[in-house]
Image: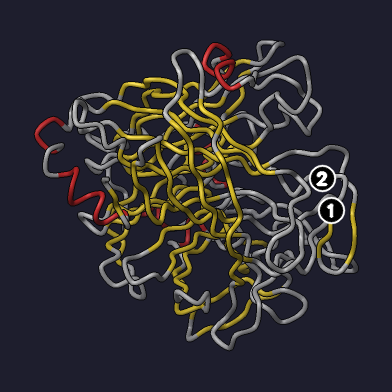
Amino acid sequence: MKVFSSLSVFAATVLAGSLASAADFPVNKGLVAAGRLPADLRDSFGETFGSGSGMTVLDWKKTDKGYEGSFLLLPDRGYNVEGTTDYRTRVNTLSIAFAAPEAGKAAVADLKLDHTLLLTDKAGKPMSGLDPVAVNKDNGTDLPGAATGAVSLDPEAVVRLPDGSLMISDEYGPAIYHFSAEGRLVSATLPPQAFLPMRKGALNFSSNNPGVGAPTPDPEDPETGRQNNQGFEGMALNPATQELTVVLQSATRQDGGDKKTTRFNTRALVYDATDPNALKLKAEYVVPLPTFKDADGKTLVAAQSELTVLPDGRLLMLSRDSNNGWGVKGEASLYRRVDLLDFAGATNIAGADFDGLKSVAPKGDLDPSVTPATLTTVIDMNDNAELAKAGLHNGAPHDASDLSEKWEAMGVVPAFDPEHPKDVLMLIANDNDFLTTRGHQVGADYKADADVDTMVLVYRLSLD
């Protein structure tokens, strides 16, 4: 029986045989398993579960029947339709098991929620999903502050370090937090000035989703820095090099992020994470987000939703459209893809004037001195021939078998196939936005318009 118990072990066992052929392009061998948990599932604290904005795999093994393992799944700031709530942010541990699939079919994956861990500040006070209305000071670092005095956190991606501690990226800051294995805040890192949301010349972390009784920010949108609800959506750690990469969901306001049609030049930051409490910025690149046409021929931008690392160190990035899929109005998604993200040949702008308030892409037009990264599609999640293997589809009929809108969590594990030793399995989970008709959170029941299950899709990739 073959087992791996951390990403670092995965890297050590596979990387050695992969570097020589790192140029081999990942080939999608198709959907091999799919599983779901009910929308009304409660976590260990009796509140609606809320699926995943981020994922990190804990352990993985091949069994006589197939595969089994466990992973962390990170929900975001809680259920919110009209404003945010004082949801205590947390991370969940899940287990998964599935048999080898039959030809032409995807196996049914058995998912189970095992444990829920609250995230707290340094004093042990739970972090809050409330929209920030203040700036909290933490040893010289400015953090988003809730009206309750808590640190506001909208968690979007998670990486587990060998000592069990967690790196979690945040949408509000945007920021990168280091938590102990027990979920207590250890340190926080803010990005360069270009990323920080500024209103009237002052740092203002609001995402324009005020809680009950809280004021609306003035102006509603930042003038520079990350756009509302477009923070550090994706993050991945290369365990072999200790490089931690985060990507902004879409362009900063000054780089065309003030309009949905021009927000495609987003940015990636690469940190040396040898000391997770003293991250050192090594590189910064412009990442050109995918664009696509809607039914009226209008060009739209697919927002970045997650990042993960392959055993050979290369990065995969998930991008998607919005407002399409089960649980929202639009029934058919126009874009959901996993792309290979390549920084080779891209211009490193770390430390340049672009890290201040000089735009690298005014009104969406990239500065001619800057070469962006490249993206190449590996998985098209909207491929109905593949989805049909699991009884799923993209588009009509608009029901619970229509993929939900948001897919925001990814993890990579070995396939343990001696004939194809470099093959991997990719787990992709949705973010169901806590949508259920039987919800309970922050001491109150709620009823959404649909029941959107938590789902995990498993694809097989060849790196030969």
SS category of the residue bearing label 1 = strand
Q: Quadrant of residue 310?
A: top left
Residue 261 lies, in percent from the top left, at 62, 28
Q: Quadrant of residue 327?
A: top right
Residue at the disc numbered 2: 436
Q: Tag on residue 95?
A: none
113 relative to 31 in the view: left or right: right
Question: Crowdedness of circle 1 by 10 Å Cα count: few (<14), some, many (20+)?
Answer: many
Residue at the disc numbered 1: 439
Residue 182 lies, in percent from the top left, at 50, 77
Circles 2 and 1: CB distance less than 8 Å? Answer: yes
SS category of the residue bearing label 2 = loop
Tell me if I can see residue 352 in this picture. Answer: no
In the foreground, 335 or 435: 435
445 relative to 203 in the view: left or right: right
Q: Which quadrant of the rendered structure holds the N terminus? A: top left
Residue 80 lies, in percent from the top left, at 80, 54
Residue lying at 47% horizontally and 53% vertically, measured from the top left: 71
140 relative to 310 in the view: left or right: right
